[in-house]
Image (cartoon, rainbow, N blue to C red):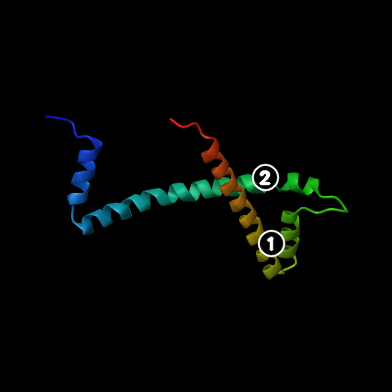
Amino acid sequence: MQALSVVDVFRLENRKPMSERVLLDRRAGQVEMPALFAVGLIVFISAVRDIPTVVFLASSRSETISLLMLDYLAGAEFEKSTVIGVFIVLVIIVAALIGRALGVRLAPRH
């Protein structure tokens, strides 16, 4: 008996009826959800642990944008806090896209 290659397994999987494939996808989702929750919890704990570092960066003359967002949240000004949060996310996305573009441009070509 010959071992199946990855391509053969993929072809066999795609021959199954759609209902059976969806069932397998649901099972995979049920297995992945606890792992995703655990990763999210670890990231949240890490972010909360870094809050004192950000607080020490602030002075009476200056304030970091994340502390401004936190002040708005504490003052129940959720709209202002949301705008600042969206701005922070956009800055992060732009920085990631710039990094990706530079990485693609500077990557060695084979």
| 73 w.r.t. 47: above or below | below
| 108 w.r.t. 86: above or below | above
State the residue at coordinates (36%, 52%): 30
State the residue at coordinates (60%, 52%): 94
Label 1 amino acid? Ile
Q: Look at the numbered disc 1 and give the secondary structure of its residue.
A: helix
State the residue at coordinates (75%, 59%): 68
Give the crowd class for mark 1: few <14, some 14-19, many >=20 residues within 10 Å.
some
Quadrant of the snapshot with the C terminus: top left
Label 2 amino acid? Arg
| 11 w.r.t. 83: above or below | above
Name the outermost residue toward the left. Answer: 1
Disc count in the image? 2
Is tag 2's residue or tag 1's residue first in the polypeptide sequence? 2
The residue pinned by badge 2 equals 49
**Location of residue 22 in the rendering, given as x and y in whole percent from the top left corner:** 27, 57
Give the crowd class for mark 2: few <14, some 14-19, many >=20 residues within 10 Å.
few
**Location of residue 93 in the rendering, given as x and y in whole percent from the top left corner:** 59, 52
The mark closer to the camera, 2 or 1, is 1
Drawn side of residue 36 relative to residue 103, left or right: left
Drawn side of residue 105 relative to residue 2, left or right: right
The residue pinned by badge 1 equals 84
